[in-house]
Image (cartoon, helix red, strand yellow):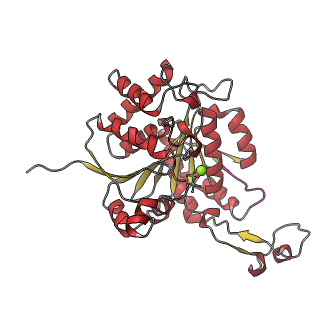
């Protein structure tokens, strides 16, 4: 009797131009003889048409039955499945590497050696999405010097809850420390702890107390606006950077900009029992249908997924092949100054796979 060692991967192609990047990525992976079986849960508009829901129970069951999910990017219609993959699966650490590939189009004069990883807390902060009318807000005492008596005095208007918990901060910061330990041993923690001592201050304090468990990791802290400036001016100095959710959302796009844009930026979301893989996001609606979307983000995201599936050798080959395409610079998509379409780019990666 033979045992099926194949991994099952649920694929959600995403919206706008995203499927145009996901499909050739999977076609390329299929040429690598990997022990992977792809399944395609219906989400978004096709699921609506067939099941009357953008994320039916059938699709959720398919995701639950798979080893992982490979997600493109969403602009809305596939959003419910993304929320399930984050909150339903408790994937609390969103890992967003920004590594410059020589030959890619960076706005910096000297982007060489940018190699940092943003670890974004993925479930808390303003993403608890608890918003309401100021007039209904139970009054929390404003801290420190303030010229107003009450937040309610601001009404009419609205508020949003920013929730930072000790447990939620600890698990993601611990994850980031462990990642830093496996990399260059430097962890940066950033948040707005000067203005928000109770919430962002808690995030920083958790990092400071965990530091005792990781004496081999150098920890530094920056207020997030200062960090934003340093990220642009001296990105090479950063190794692993951990931050609350919203800052991570914004600054991971900024980091992607430094290495050539969202077309270059992979990501993976990890929890204790589950991980899934998505690009750092951008569905490129402006070029949907042109088959010119840059699939590099998807290919590098696939490499992160292969690592997770214990297919690390294939992951390294894929990364090396992509790097060679940029180094040679002959077949690049328009966002990187080339004229190649998505399929032609993937064909070039396939050609380079023969050489690595
Ligand atoms: C991201 C995206 C998502 C987010 C959207 C699509 C909900 O911007 O993954 O960075 O805000 O987290
Ligand atoms: Mg984003």
* Nearer to us in this view, 96 or 340: 340
Where are the magenta residues, as a range? 190-196
Residue 249 visible? The answer is yes
Count of numbered circles on the image: 0
Residue at image location 49% in from the left, 19% down from the top: 330
- Magenta-span inclusion, residue 194: yes
- Can you say whether 5 is above or below 62 in the image? above
Residue at image location 36% in from the left, 63% down from the top: 59
Q: Position of residue 153 (x, y in %)?
A: 86, 76
- Can you say whether 109 is above or below 21 in the image? above
Residue at image location 46% in from the left, 63% down from the top: 84
* Nearer to us in this view, 356 or 27: 27
Q: Position of residue 48 (x, y in %)?
A: 43, 65
* Nearer to us in this view, 350 or 245: 350
| Dominant SS in magenta | loop
Quadrant (top left/top right/bottom left/bottom right) for the C terminus: top left
């Amino acid at each position: 009797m033979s045992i099926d060692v194949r991994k099952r991967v649920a694929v959600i192609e995403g919206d706008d131009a995203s499927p145009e990047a996901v499909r050739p990525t999977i076609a390329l992976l299929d040429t690598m003889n990997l022990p992977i079986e792809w399944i395609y849960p219906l989400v978004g508009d096709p699921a609506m048409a067939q099941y009357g829901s953008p994320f039916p129970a059938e699709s959720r069951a398919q995701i639950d039955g798979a080893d992982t999910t490979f997600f493109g990017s969403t602009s809305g219609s596939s959003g419910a499945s993304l929320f399930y993959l984050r909150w339903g699966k408790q994937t609390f650490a969103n890992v967003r590497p920004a590594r410059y590939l020589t030959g890619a189009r960076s706005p910096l004069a000297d982007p060489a050696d940018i190699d940092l990883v943003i670890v974004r807390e993925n479930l808390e902060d303003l993403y608890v999405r608890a918003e309401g009318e100021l007039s209904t807000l139970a009054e929390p005492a404003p801290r420190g010097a303030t010229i107003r008596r009450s937040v309610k005095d601001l009404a009419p208007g609205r508020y949003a809850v920013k929730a930072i918990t000790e447990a939620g901060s600890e698990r993601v910061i611990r994850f980031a420390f462990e990642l830093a330990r496996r990399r260059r041993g430097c962890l940066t923690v950033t948040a707005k702890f000067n203005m928000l001592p109770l919430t962002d201050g808690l995030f920083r304090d958790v990092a400071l107390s965990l530091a005792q468990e990781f004496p081999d990791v150098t920890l530094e802290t920056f207020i997030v606006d200062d960090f934003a400036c340093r990220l642009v001016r001296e990105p090479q100095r950063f190794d692993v950077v951990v931050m609350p959710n919203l800052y991570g959302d914004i600054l991971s796009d900024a980091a992607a900009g430094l290495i050539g844009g969202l077309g270059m930026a992979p990501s993976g979301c990890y929890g204790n029992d589950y991980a899934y893989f998505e690009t750092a996001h951008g569905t490129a609606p402006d070029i949907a249908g042109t088959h010119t979307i840059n699939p590099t983000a998807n290919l590098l995201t696939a490499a992160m997924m292969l690592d997770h599936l214990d297919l690390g050798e294939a992951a390294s080959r894929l990364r090396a092949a992509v790097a060679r395409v940029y180094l040679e610079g002959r077949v690049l998509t328009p966002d990187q100054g080339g004229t190649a379409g998505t399929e032609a780019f993937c064909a070039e990666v396939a050609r380079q796979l023969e050489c690595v």
